[in-house]
Image (tube, rainbow, N blue to C red):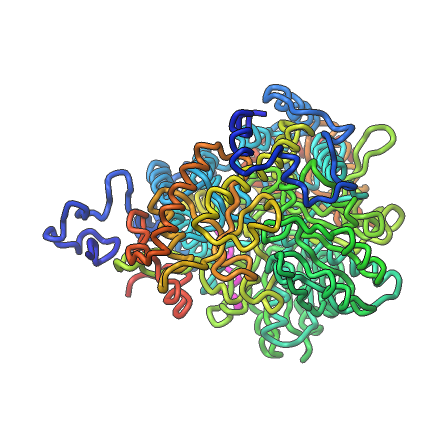
């Protein structure tokens, strides 16, 4: 039991000091009839490092990792190359094994990182302020709806058809318990989003309009027009960005008029990790600061006048306001925020733009190659690094068969929208810098054969 | 003495201010001051090399192409490594020493867990890959779920909640769904005052009115008060056990029976489950739902405040209402995700989805590796050592610090003290800050609220007797100074990277992002 430093002699000496006959005696307050007397039956005893590593390696080997095959999945989780120094730095023990910075004098490392992270996120999103991260994009999106409800005192939310269906499900689940009214229709397979339909759903009861940018099919909605229409009715525009790298190439939602911008930060520094832990990003206007959920890091000074950082505005939070708190969120994703921030620092302005340009170029190359395949049409001519193909076949079957041929081809819309036959030919293809032109060619050839 | 009146900018510091302790740069040997990336980087510097780009096909961005600058600062790779390495050294961490935050539970982070989480089959798989290509990842989720069920004696487990508070929400939503299924619109959740602040916030967030239940003189839930309040409007009671006074709720079974008899459910905040693993199963105590903070009970790094992971174990009555998706094991040994597509047949009562994808996989691998390393025998020994360590500290300190419940039985994994006996003008905060100068992370301060000036110390099983003795000696000495009213305590810390920070100013005029100096 290598993680336990006490020796039997220590235990004996300590028990003597306490005046207790045994460790078991310290559990005297647990009623005898429910106390367990020995190790739980059916569970194995402790194992050495080698044995555990072997067991986990065997389980790991039963998966097909993205790095081993041509890989084109996106839909809210993207594969990007993470520089080696990111993982190295987040594994420094002083970052990795510290807790929430409740004692700021000895947590300036984490606090300064969070302050820098907030600044990076605010700038990326084109907003005035940002928080120190949330669990993930989907939960951040729900928190944004709650914030819009608090600000507008209205409870109807209009969701665009292009919002990630898992985000929609999350919102619908939570709204069901809050009594919020949600207006949402699944997407139609048309090349451009329809701002008109969305705008016509906004009325005097609407707290917010939620628009994903780029949207789930890879299309680019007209945020500025929607923002104007929403604000004219006293509603807020919540923009959702699931692929932050896109903002290296397209205008920021804040610039286009969004009131709250939320999204997933996983693309930068965090990695795929089968869906979690991820990183929720959250930014808004300064005037809404006291309505924003989650942790905030702020600048201040110490008694010697030196700049320093602290967690602040905690009067909004659960540990002070309890049932009146803006949210019940307690933890954040500080380590993922660190990874995001380090990756962002390595990229800088120039690097993020170069990365975005490279993604876009490869996606254009792939779209042009794939749409030339008989039985394949390209839905949207306008996109960043992800677009929708329309196959003359069931896309889920195609994806499954291509995985057997050693290509992870994309996300079939049928996986995201089960039961919607009209979407079953849709295939979402994401192309990042990790795909080589050879990978694209392999995908095209295999898809050609599959559809032939 | 103001050693560096102008803060971080060495150019403005006059050489005359250099003293034995002050320096031109503000650095102190290994302790280096570090500016913000926006002050040392710029828009042109980049720490990543990109291939020469071939001529791009025509852009498909249309009118959305970015024209405005983002305003990001970049650093080269060596500058980046230095920046973050220097910052890291201004952090106290469990790798540096004891981190006795009561109710937060900071444990040793075994590096095997980190290695395992980075295996490509776990780290580099996409949540929407065909399920045939992620059987090992699904097996991890299922195997961990089985352990959690066995250790808690419960019926099912929801793995998707992303942190403890998210798990609380999941549990309360299960309760709400179960009540709605029987057409019972109860509106009130009872929360003892010693509960974590997330408990009432969660109940309110799920649409309930929250009412408190007082603690009795022993620091436990007042059973009579609870029974008197139970009625047809009460949906659930949220209890923390072991509670935040560091005590086991002896009446837990009686509480559960009373709650169930009143048609309500028992939610247990499992944040302190690490104290009783292998000693008692919450299912045997009548608990209906309990979240397990994997990072507290089974160690995950929690670097600076997250990520966490908060699976929720559920009783037979609540399991049908758990969220989507979850992993099922088929008769042929294959694993399958139960998602919206088949939920109508296979999990029809589910309250729905509470986040995208399948939960905190990176935390599941770490928790499973930790559980397998400890095994059933080691987990039981760990809870025993955690309780032993806490009681040892209680006994080493209760002659100098007031222990409000020191005589009501053994404490569990955390020892609670109050500020009673400190001289006027000396606070719990001062004692905590003085510990910093001695090289220790302070305990939890001012929590739980039921005790004035609370100090909640949780050593965990990871600390050796030698460490406990050093910590106890330091705190013993500080406590004696606190009783004597030593004014030096109010100046602490003086050896940390920063002296006391002005939190009031930070809240009064919030500066949450860096701005170019005017």
Closer to the camera in the image, A241 or A193: A241
Closer to the camera in the image, B316 or B509: B316
Up/down of A239 relative to A276, above or below: below
Q: Position of residue B427 (x, y in %)?
A: 40, 60
Q: Can you tell which quarter of the image residue B14 is in?
A: bottom left
Q: Is residue A208 left or right of residue B176?
A: left
Up/down of A36 relative to A419, above or below: above
Q: Main secondary structure of the magenta part?
A: loop
Residue B262 falls within the magenta-colored stretch: no
Instruction: For the N terminus of chain A, give its image quadrant.
Output: top right
Q: Can you tell which quarter of the image residue B216 is in?
A: bottom right
Q: Is residue B21 left or right of residue A230?
A: left
Up/down of B446 relative to A19, above or below: below
Taking the spot 73% from the left edge, 30% from the top edge, the residue there is A38
Q: Position of residue A106 (x, y in %)?
A: 38, 48
Residue A254 falls within the magenta-colored stretch: yes
**What is the residue that sits farthest to the left in this orientation?**
B16
Q: Is residue A340 at all visible to an observer of this figure?
A: no
The number of numbered discs placed on residues in the rendered structure image is 0
Closer to the camera in the image, B493 or B161: B493
Instruction: For the C terminus of chain A, give its image quadrant.
Output: top right
Q: What span is in magenta?
A: A248-258
Closer to the camera in the image, B281 or A30: A30
Q: Position of residue B161 (x, y in %)?
A: 67, 49
Q: Is residue B181 at all visible to an observer of this figure?
A: yes
Taking the spot 17% from the left edge, 53% from the top edge, the residue there is B11
């Amino acid at each position: 039991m290598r993680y336990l430093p006490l020796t039997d002699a220590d235990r004996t000496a300590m028990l003597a000091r306490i005046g207790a006959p045994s460790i078991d005696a310290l559990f005297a307050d647990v009623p005898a009839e429910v106390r367990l007397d020995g190790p739980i039956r059916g569970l194995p005893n402790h194992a050495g490092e080698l044995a555990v590593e072997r067991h986990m390696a065997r389980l790991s080997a039963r998966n097909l990792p993205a790095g081993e095959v041509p890989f084109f999945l996106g839909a809210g989780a993207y594969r990007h190359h993470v520089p080696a120094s990111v993982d190295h730095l987040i594994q420094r023990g002083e970052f990795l094994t510290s807790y929430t910075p409740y004692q700021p004098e000895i947590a300036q490392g984490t606090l300064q990182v969070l302050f820098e992270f907030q600044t990076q996120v605010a700038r990326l999103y084109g907003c005035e302020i940002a928080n120190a991260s949330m669990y993930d994009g989907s939960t951040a999106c729900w928190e944004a709806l709650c914030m819009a409800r608090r600000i507008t005192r209205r409870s109807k939310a209009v969701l665009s058809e292009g919002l990630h269906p898992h985000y929609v499900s999350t919102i619908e689940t939570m709204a069901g318990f809050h009594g919020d009214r949600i207006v949402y229709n699944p997407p139609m397979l048309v090349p451009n989003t329809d701002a008109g339909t969305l705008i016509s759903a906004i009325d005097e009861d609407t707290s917010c309009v939620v628009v994903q940018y780029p949207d789930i099919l890879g299309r680019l909605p007209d945020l500025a027009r929607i923002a104007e229409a929403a604000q004219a009715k006293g509603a807020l525009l919540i923009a959702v960005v699931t692929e932050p790298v896109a903002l290296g190439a397209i205008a920021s939602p804040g610039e286009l008029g969004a009131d709250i911008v939320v999204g997933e930060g996983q693309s930068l520094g965090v990695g795929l990790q089968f869906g979690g832990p991820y990183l929720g990003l959250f930014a808004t206007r300064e005037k809404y600061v006291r309505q924003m959920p989650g942790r905030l890091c702020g600048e201040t000074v110490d008694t010697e006048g030196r700049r320093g950082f602290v967690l602040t505005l905690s009067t909004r939070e659960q540990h002070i306001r309890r049932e009146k708190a803006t949210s019940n969120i307690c933890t954040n994703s500080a380590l993922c925020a660190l990874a995001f921030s380090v990756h962002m620092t390595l990229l800088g302005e120039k690097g993020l733009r170069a990365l975005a340009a490279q993604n876009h170029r490869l996606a254009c190359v792939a779209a042009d190659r794939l749409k030339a395949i008989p039985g394949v049409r390209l839905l949207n001519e306008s996109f960043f690094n992800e677009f929708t193909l329309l196959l003359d076949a069931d896309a889920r079957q195609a994806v499954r068969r291509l995985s057997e041929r050693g290509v992870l081809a994309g996300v079939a819309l049928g996986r995201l929208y089960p039961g919607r036959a009209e979407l079953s030919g849709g295939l979402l293809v994401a192309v990042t810098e990790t795909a080589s032109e050879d990978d694209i060619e392999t995908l095209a050839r295999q898809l050609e054969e599959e559809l032939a | 003495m103001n050693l560096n009146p102008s803060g971080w900018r060495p150019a403005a510091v006059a050489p005359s201010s250099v003293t034995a302790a002050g320096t031109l740069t503000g650095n102190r040997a290994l302790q280096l001051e570090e500016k913000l990336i926006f002050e040392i980087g710029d828009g042109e510097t980049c720490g990543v090399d990109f291939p020469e780009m071939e001529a791009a096909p025509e852009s498909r961005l249309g009118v959305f192409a970015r024209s405005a600058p983002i305003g990001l600062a970049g650093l080269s790779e060596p500058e980046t490594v230095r920046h973050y390495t220097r910052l890291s050294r201004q952090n106290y961490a469990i790798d540096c020493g004891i981190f006795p935050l009561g109710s937060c539970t900071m444990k040793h982070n075994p590096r095997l867990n980190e290695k395992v989480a980075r295996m490509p089959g776990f780290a580099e798989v996409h949540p929407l890959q065909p399920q045939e290509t992620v059987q090992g990842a699904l097996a991890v989720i299922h195997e961990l779920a089985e352990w959690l069920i066995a250790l808690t004696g419960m019926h099912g487990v929801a793995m998707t909640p992303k942190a403890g508070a998210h798990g609380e929400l999941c549990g309360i939503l299960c309760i709400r769904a179960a009540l709605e299924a029987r057409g019972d619109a109860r509106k009130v959740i009872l929360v003892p005052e010693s509960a974590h602040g997330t408990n009432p916030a969660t109940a309110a967030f799920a649409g309930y009115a929250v009412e408190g239940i007082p603690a009795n003189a022993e620091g436990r839930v007042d059973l009579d008060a609870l029974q008197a309040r139970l009625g047809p409007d009460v949906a659930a009671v949220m209890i923390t056990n072991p509670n935040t006074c560091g005590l086991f709720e002896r009446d837990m079974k009686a509480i559960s029976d009373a709650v169930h008899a009143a048609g309500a459910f028992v939610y247990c905040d499992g944040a302190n489950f690490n104290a009783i693993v292998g000693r008692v199963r919450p299912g045997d105590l009548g608990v209906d739902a309990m979240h397990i903070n994997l990072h507290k009970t089974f160690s995950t790094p929690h670097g600076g405040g997250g990520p966490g992971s908060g699976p929720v174990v559920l009783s037979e009555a609540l399991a049908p209402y758990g969220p989507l998706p979850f992993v099922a094991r088929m008769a042929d040994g294959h694993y399958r995700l139960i998602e919206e597509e088949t939920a109508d047949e296979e999990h029809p009562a589910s309250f729905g989805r509470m986040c995208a994808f399948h939960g905190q996989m990176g935390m599941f691998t770490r928790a499973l590796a930790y559980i397998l390393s400890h095994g059933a025998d080691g987990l039981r020994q760990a809870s025993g050592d955690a309780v032993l360590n806490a009681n040892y500290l209680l006994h080493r300190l209760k002659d100098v610090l007031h222990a409000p419940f020191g005589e009501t039985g053994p404490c569990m994994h955390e020892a609670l003290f109050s500020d009673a006996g400190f001289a006027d003008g000396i606070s719990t905060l001062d004692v905590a800050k003085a510990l910093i100068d001695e090289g220790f992370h302070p305990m939890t301060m001012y929590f739980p609220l039921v005790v004035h000036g609370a100090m909640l110390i949780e050593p965990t099983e990871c600390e050796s007797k030698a460490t406990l003795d050093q910590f106890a000696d330091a705190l013993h000495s500080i406590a004696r100074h606190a009783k004597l009213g030593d004014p030096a305590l109010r100046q602490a810390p003086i050896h940390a990277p920063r002296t006391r920070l002005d939190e009031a100013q930070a809240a009064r005029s919030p500066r949450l992002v860096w701005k170019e100096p005017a």
